[in-house]
Image (cartoon, rainbow, N blue to C red):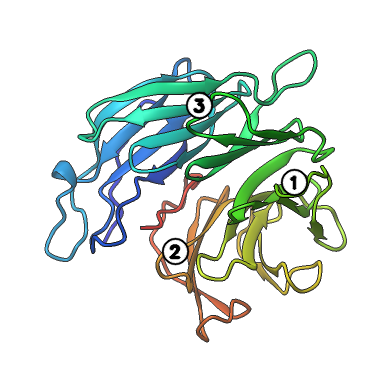
Amino acid sequence: MDPIAKYISQKISKTRWRPISPALLQQPEVFATGSWDNENNSVSIWSVGEHGVSNTDGEFDEEPQLLCASQHDGDVMDLQFLDQDRLVSASSSGAVMIFKLQPDCQALSLAHVWERAHRYSCDNTPCTAVVCRSPELVSVGEDGRVTLYKADQTEVVRVIENADSSTIHAVTFLRTTEVLTVNSIGQLKMWDFRQQSDSPAQILSLTGDRVPLHCVDKHPNQQHIVATGGQDGMLCIWDVRQGNTPFSLIEAHSAEMWEVHFHPSNPSHLFTCSEDGSLLHWETTSGSDMSTLLQIPVAAQPDTVCQQPRCA
């Protein structure tokens, strides 16, 4: 199937599929986008095809339809669904925002804002990423802070003020109380919120040059396995239980890797996208052994920057 493209008047920084119940044996039909570098940025909700109707092969054959949108203060640096009805954004203004989506997807409104969640003493600094595990969410930023929130509480739950001396680019939950961050000097740091200390529980790093890491994702079924991508386009697979360096490195892209995602229900499949304009699909060749990844051909626009892979 050839890709379906819809051209719009905004630059899109992030795309996320609205989650569906695991009991429903269907593809997600609604997704959200966030914009950047526009005079007026927004978070928008879209439906694939005519109200999400697919053809007999289960593929969508119509362009996305805009359902609703809400203005967003600053660039959308990251976007994550907290649940089916709530969406969390990270802003270049330093704020973390929760948007409420009506059940019929016809209205999106701002429900809560944590202003200046990320900041220096004299100015705001971008919040670079958020991760959600309802009701908890965690944000990270250029200020090196790691901040824990609960969606139903207006006050911040915990702040690790000096978690990093460099920019933290991405974060993922490992377990309910543990998150993993990646930074601009090639380090992964594990944080356990059960500990009172503001020191990381573990630090892993790439050997040699300190290449910035831009993205991270956890294996859905094996919490100790994570994938990262960075400025050099390398795909790295790590086992946080064993050693402090990756056990697999693959020359995946010719430019910065912006996103890496395990397929949520079929984690032997992995997706990466890059500044080089490519979206790559990877598959393990021997069951759960993540050290043996092979690239599978996938359609992508060759002359554009691919900022977000689709993981159904």
Q: Amino acid at mark 1?
A: Asn
Residues under numbered marks 1 and 2 in contact, where contact means CB atoms less than 8 Å apart: no
Name the outermost residue toward the left: 56
In the rendered image, residue 272, in percent from the top left (x then y), is placed at 53, 58
Q: To which residue does mark 2 refer?
A: 263
Displayed quadrant of residue 85: top left
If you read the primary sequence from the N terminus, does the residue marked by circle 3 or circle 2 appear first?
A: 3
Whether residue 45 sits left or right of residue 216 in the image: it is left
The alpha-carbon separation of the residues under discs 1 and 3 comes to: 23 Å
Question: Helix or strand or loop: what does disc 2 sit on?
Answer: loop
Identify the residue at horizontal 24%, vertical 31% (top origin).
67
Q: To which residue does mark 3 refer?
A: 97
Displayed quadrant of residue 140: top right
Q: Amino acid at mark 3?
A: Met
Q: Which mark is residue 6?
A: none
Name the outermost residue toward the bottom: 286
Q: To which residue does mark 1 refer?
A: 183
The alpha-carbon separation of the residues under discs 1 and 2 comes to: 24 Å
